[in-house]
């Protein structure tokens, strides 16, 4: 797999990721796997830097999900 840091995705913008338009879907599907990965990394990095959500590791998320499942049973 290629290094996504070298892929310029700065020109790729979607109108909505929550409710993508037909145009958004066509744009996403036109991207290579590497470009899609780079867009996801870019957007996740931006979300973490925004300070709106706490930065948590995958291990933290799994532990939280398992704890929630124990409380439901």
Image (tube, rainbow, N blue to C red):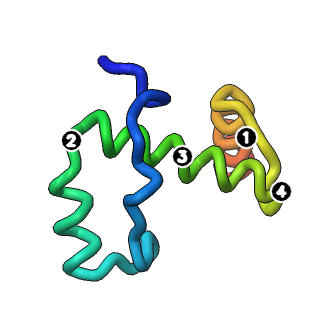
Query: Counting residues from the N terminus, which is met first, the one under dot 3 or under dot 4?
Result: 3
Viewer-closest of 44 and 63: 44
Name the residue that disc number 3 marks.
42
The secondary element bearing badge 2 is classed as loop
Give neighbour class at mark 2: few <14, some 14-19, many 20+ (Cα, 10 Å). few
Closer mark to the observer between disc 4 and disc 1: 4
Closer mark to the observer between disc 1 and disc 3: 3
CA gap, disc 2 to disc 4? 30 Å
Viewer-closest of 64 and 59: 59
Name the residue that disc number 2 marks.
32
Outermost residue toward the top? 1
Name the residue rendered at 46%, 53% in the picture.
10
The answer to whether residue 10 is left or right of residue 36 is right
Residue 51 has which mark? 4
Give neighbour class at mark 3: few <14, some 14-19, many 20+ (Cα, 10 Å). some
Query: Counting residues from the N terminus, which is met first, the one under dot 2 or under dot 4?
Result: 2
Q: In the image, residue 26 lies at what x, y percent?
A: 17, 67
Q: Quadrant of the N terminus?
A: top left
Whether 12 is drawn above or below 4: the answer is below
Give neighbour class at mark 1: few <14, some 14-19, many 20+ (Cα, 10 Å). few
The answer to whether residue 6 is left or right of residue 33 is right
Name the residue that disc number 1 marks.
64
Q: In the image, residue 19 lies at what x, y percent?
A: 39, 80
Whether 60 is drawn above or below 72: the answer is above
Whether 26 is drawn above or below 70: the answer is below
The secondary element bearing badge 4 is classed as loop
The answer to whether residue 35 is left or right of residue 52 is left
Whether 62 is drawn above or below 65: the answer is above
Q: Can you tell which quarter of the image residue 7 is in?
A: top left
Q: Are marks 2 and 1 in contact (CB under 8 Å)?
A: no
């Amino acid at each position: 797999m290629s290094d996504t840091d070298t892929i310029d995705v700065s020109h790729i913008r979607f109108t909505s990721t929550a409710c993508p338009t037909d145009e958004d879907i066509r744009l996403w599907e036109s991207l290579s796997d590497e470009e899609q990965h780079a867009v996801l990394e870019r957007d996740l990095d931006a979300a973490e830097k925004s300070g709106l959500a706490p930065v948590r590791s995958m291990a933290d998320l799994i532990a939280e999900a398992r704890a929630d499942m124990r409380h439901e049973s």
